[in-house]
Image (tube, rainbow, N blue to C red):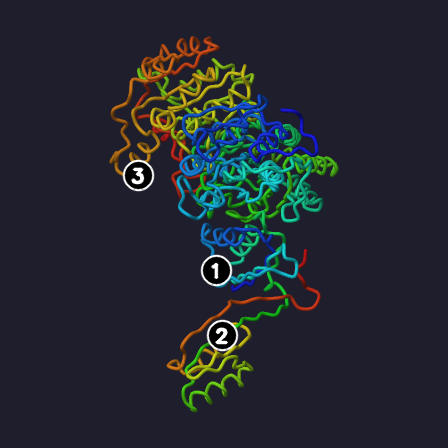
Amino acid sequence: MRHIISVLLENEAGALSRVAGLFTARGYNIESLTVAPTEDPSLSRMTLVTRGSESVIEQITKQLNKLVDAVKLVDLTEGLHIERELLLMKVKASNNNQREEAKRLVDIFQGRIIEVSENSYVLEVTGRGEKIEAFIKAIEPSLIIEVVRTGASGIGRGNRSLQV
Amino acid sequence: MDMPTESEVLSGAEIVIRSLIAEDVEYVFGYPGGTVLFIYDALFKQDKVKHILVRHEQAAAHAADGYARATGKPGVVLVTSGPGATNSVTGIATAYMDSIPLVIISGQVPTTLIGNDAFQEVDFVGITRPCVKHNFLVNDVKKLAATLKKAFHIATTGRPGPVVVDIPKDITAQMATFDYPQTVEMRSYKPVVNGHPGQIRRAAELILSAKKPVIYSGGGVVLGNASEELTEFTKMLGYPITQTLMGLGSYPATDQQFIGMLGMHGTYEANMAMHECDVLVAVGARFDDRVTGDVKKFCPDAKIIHIDIDPASISKNVQIDIPIVGSVDKVLRELTRAVKETLQKPDAEALAAWWKQIEEWRAIHCLYYDKGSDLIKPQYVIEKLWEVTDGASGDAFITSDVGQHQMWAAQYYKFVKPRRWINSGGLGTMGFGLPSAMGVQLAHPGATVACVTGEASFQMCLQELSTCKQFDLPIKILCLNNRYMGMVRQWQEMFYDKRYSHSYMDALPDFVKLVESYGHVGMRIDKPADVEGAMREAFKMKDKLVFLDFITDQAENVYPMIAAGRGQHEMMLSPNKEEESI
């Protein structure tokens, strides 16, 4: 099962490598990992996507909780939640056909063109991982110059929240 | 140095020493070098914290570890950057695996040079990350005292463990106001201490419903100082108790309810009782693979209660029915009370039948060995050690290295008090025995301290004979010398068709001459009849380190044995026992 785990970490040097090191040392699977400070500069919020059996996920959450820098943790997949990923893609846009194709797909996927240059566009799409994958598939491969994905971030719906 | 007052301005190095004084640190085990010179200078100018100069930094960590195991107080290590730090890593990993509280202060190159591949620079925080409970790199002298306070707090609370504080040299020279914090408040670190009352009630009911119960306790009982609580709980129920290698001594091994150590080299009765039990009460134990064997065959009929301070230990290897997270002493007290409050008693009839079965298993005498041999049997040496050190009093401290001799010590020395059996269980570190005995002897100057070792393990840290001389540590070293890495040889005999690949100890030194050259006493014993006399003579020399080189039977193996990957009931007994039992 795929799980999205959000962790509030002390914003200390090395906190990220403690998490990354834990996953390699214990042989846990890690699909993506994003981390950035929160509104409180002493805290970072990390979202990680992992896969494993129930017992493995239980161990992962316990081992993460055990890290001295981990303040709080939630497995978002245990309840209703919103998940988003950001895609930045540079595509060829040197003739009208290419420009129109890019514009058309961006509209369908409710994305945006955020940079226009002589021969290329930079596109921005947000959404769940599946949507991002669908968008990448929809674009003619020969047009793609560069793809950047952030990995998933997530937040609980309604009253579910992860705070100190 | 005077007691700290509030507005003193001190150097980083002085802050380190004053923080150690504030933590009531008696001994620091260390070795000087470039980046810790300011700290050593501050150490020189005071007399409250005593420094024990080891001969290799691995031994500093083991000695601090032995001190911690024997006292329950944190052990403190001081090493320089680079090789000094990396040398200590084996000792840190050893302490980590057995949850021993250590604070390791390491020098680091000046902050301005970090990352420049400076002389004796190593990313010590990076290197130790997977084998410490936590670590710190101090980058501001104003944070130094608070960081040290946190380090001691983290090392000694919850599930204990080693904490590294890496201090760049320039920080030790800079000045700051010294104000050692009295308390620590960390929002990210709050170990659970009290067990959940509902879980305790459910556990009490399950315990009373048992027909074939077993109590299985581990090192957590020793670390949590819960021997009294465990003994009261066990006595109240009248249930059989088995212990892990790390738990020995926290329940008297001479008591009838004790059915021996369990696991790979556990007793027949302990492993069979585990296999057949219907309720298992695990207390401060972590279901290590050396205990469980094949987890699929582990306690197939049992409902399992697990008491542990570390939530991550619960259901890690074996699925638990009733977990109780909390400190073992408190939970055991609550559980004892909860059992009493039910006003029910254990099922006497079922328990009598269960004990009858256990006594049948016990009657196999799985620890039997050939007593008529012309060669010195290692088991015999340990049995004599128990007699000569007045084992029944439980006062002597026994450290060990790793291998066959360690298992024989665990099997044949009946420990009756906690913190007396000092060995590297989790990491299995050869070389641990002598340096850890130094820490034990310093902690308990008048006590009998013996190190059971083998000629292979001993050579891994024998340089510490010099430290023992310098600090007058009258340790008695019992070397079970079989001219083999015995446990390796045993596995090669059993599982590799007797291809003894590189397990023979060729070119051994004359140990008697070797220890004599350090100013100690050495004896060589090669006849069974001389074992006891030599031992008595050695232990009479109260102020001397004595090395007893016992030339033992080379072919002796450790039994019983559960081969890796087998079930608990699939034990191999000593060959002369096999026909009559399984």
Q: What element carries label 1?
A: loop
Residue drawn at (61%, 41%) of the image? B142
Give the amino acid at mark 2.
Leu
Q: In which quarter of the image is residue B488?
A: top left
Q: Residue A30 carries which label?
A: 1
Q: Which of marks 2 and 1 is in front?
A: 2
Q: Residue B182 carries which label?
A: none
What residue is disc 3 on? B495
Discs 2, 1: same chain: yes
Where does the C terminus of chain B fall, quadrant-wise?
Answer: top left
Question: Disc 1 and disc 3: Cα gap in Å?
Answer: 37 Å
Residue drawn at (62%, 56%) of the image? A43
Q: Mark 2 lies on which chain?
A: A
- The residue nearer to you, when weighing A80 against B317, is A80
Q: Is mark 3 on a helix, strand or loop?
A: helix
Image location of residue A79, percent across then percent down? 63, 65
Question: Disc 2 and disc 3: Cα gap in Å?
Answer: 57 Å
Give the amino acid at mark 1.
Ile
Give above or below for B432 relative to B309: above
Q: Which chain carries label 1?
A: A
Q: Is residue B65 in view?
A: yes
Q: Which of marks 2 and 3 is in front?
A: 2
Where does the N terminus of chain B fall, quadrant-wise?
Answer: top right
Q: Earlier in the sequence, mark 2 or mark 1?
A: 1
Q: Which mark is residue A88?
A: 2
Q: Which of marks 1 and 3 is in front?
A: 1
Give above or below for B221 relative to B378: below
